[in-house]
Image (spheres, grey):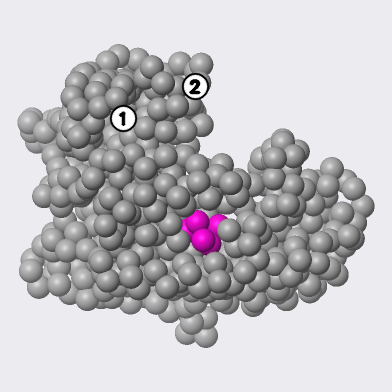
Amino acid sequence: MAIWSAEIKEIEKLCESLKGQFPDLEKELERLIKADDENMILLYSRRCLEVINTDLCECELSRPRKSEPLKGIIDKLHKERKVPSHIITSMHGLSELSTYGAHPKDFDPEQVKPVLVNLDIIIKWYLKYKDFQIVGKQKSEEEKTESKPAAISTLGKSLIVLPFENISPDPDQEYFSDGLTEEIITDLSHINNLLVISRSSAMTFKGTKKTIPEIVKSVNVRYVLKGSVRKAGNNLRITAQLIDGMTDTHLWADKYNGKLDDVFDIQERVSQSIADALKIRLNPEEKKRIAHLPIENVKAYEYYFRAKQAMDAWTESELSQAEQLLQKALEIEGENALLYSQLRYINYQYWNLGYRIDEKCLKTASEYVNKIFAIDADSIHGFFLRGTLELAGENVQKSIHDYNRVLSFDPNYAEVLFWLSAWLTFLGKAISAIDKLGKEIPQNYVFKLLNVLKSALLGEKSPLGSLDSNLERWAKKDSSYSLAIAECYSITQETGKAIEWLNLSINLGSINYPFLNEYDPLLKNIRNDERFKKLMERVKYEWKNFEV
């Protein structure tokens, strides 16, 4: 038993009490608890401190952290007396000790225990700072007499926005209700004390017959926002209801009637009403983010909504239609970072999906990154586009860095969440979806590769034997696709080829050591091979030294 087992158990108890309240912190704590390597414990402890200090930087120093060093933030918090001195001491202790985890030759296992002790102290102070009552902890008599409201259950202030129902006379207006749903999710995601389920997860409940209690149970949240949209010409009527999923009772409901030009005001009012109903006090930065309009002209906004709906289809014709719609939006709106990023993202998708195997598609997209940053130096849409192009250019670490910049501002940025989870999603749905998609877009490289994966999963021998030469050449340029081919060879127990493609994927940037070494179920057939173990030694080192 490790000498720090007791400290890990304390951290685990602490994590169990947070469900739904602090998603970023919980994610790092869960990784820490599962880690079986001393260096990884140090790494995830430091990441927990990074999460806390990034929030403190925004709340107490009134500025985004960006790339500011951890020590610099701690020193600034200390100098301005924003954090108690004993907590600053624990922060410095954790920060200094955890840095040695990146350099195994300097590592002493004895330092793990004090790191965990300091982390426990810091988190407990942080939760008190956030007015969060730890579940199971008994209040003192003094605390019982305070006028503070009782903490919400372990699910906390967590919410799913169900797709708003289109009740317009024209069923084709569904693009508008879907677009409005996404925009409300984005606005609510800017509220720090509210956990909001992502758009991709929320849209899976479109047209669902599930009850509210069933929905909240399946996504582990407490509250549900549902509504409807009726758009007829320039007239607009929107209804919204906030429901407590634990009791299936309405907390708040409202109806908004107006003209199309009022849609921006309605979005802001809905978000503010949700915050009020949940007794969340918005700070000036949150109010500013919610009030921000990425597109100011309503007609351009409509074109954008239509384009997003078309882009979701992934067919070449729909991408072309989306491209035309975005061009129309730009003609009305003028230079706009969001519209530029989506327009050039389509150029990337032409290349990525194999419709146009022409490097000009990537070059065209790349030319607009600087243009977007010229409009807004901190544009999350610019970081998204640059991160996606870096992914295509094999700069995986830089890509993740840019994607993290996006998610720090908008945790539910749909395209970023898609790329970070794409292959796990693909693998989970591969067999059931591939046949249908293959009939619709048989020349699409993504689905060609998925079809190969499906064949491997169904036990067909050597499904890659007749691999399309263009597809193979395309896959050799992308870490995710080369990993998929390695997985196929692993499934069919062609170990040599699996190792060869896995090595290629690693060279292109696949360095997620826990996933490759333990969690990817499709690599289990090659894990006992000495060549695989040697590759993992290299990946483990790079993973430990990886910095976002």
Viewer-side residue, 254 vs 315: 315
Residue lying at 21% horizontally and 71% vertically, measured from the top left: 73
Q: 312 left or right of 95?
A: right
Residue 19 in view here:
no
Q: Position of residue 79 (x, y in %)?
A: 9, 73
Q: Which mark is residue 366?
A: none
| SS under mark 1 | loop
Q: Residue 346: within the magenta? A: yes
Mark 1 neighbour density, 10 Å: few (under 14) some (14–19) many (20 or more): some
* Residue picked out by circle 2: 207
Q: Magenta stretch mostly in which secondary structure?
A: helix
Q: Position of residue 153 (x, y in %)?
A: 31, 29
Q: Position of residue 352 (x, y in %)?
A: 60, 60
Viewer-side residue, 108 vs 28: 28
**Residue type for callout 2:** Gly
* Residue picked out by circle 1: 153
Mark 2 neighbour density, 10 Å: few (under 14) some (14–19) many (20 or more): few
Residue lying at 42% horizontally and 39% vertically, measured from the top left: 306
Q: Residues at badges 1 and 2 in contact (C-beta under 8 Å)?
A: no
| Residues drawn in magenta | 345-349
Viewer-side residue, 312 vs 510: 312
Residue at far bottom of view: 105
Disc number lying in front (1 or 2): 2
Viewer-side residue, 513 vs 360: 360
Q: Quadrant of the C terminus?
A: bottom left
- Which of the two labelled residues, at mark 1 and mark 2, occupies the earlier sequence position? 1
Q: How far is disc 1 from disc 2 in space, using C-alphas?
A: 29 Å
Q: Is residue 263 above or below residue 233?
A: below
Residue lying at 47% horizontally and 52% vertically, measured from the top left: 323
Q: Quadrant of the N terminus?
A: bottom right
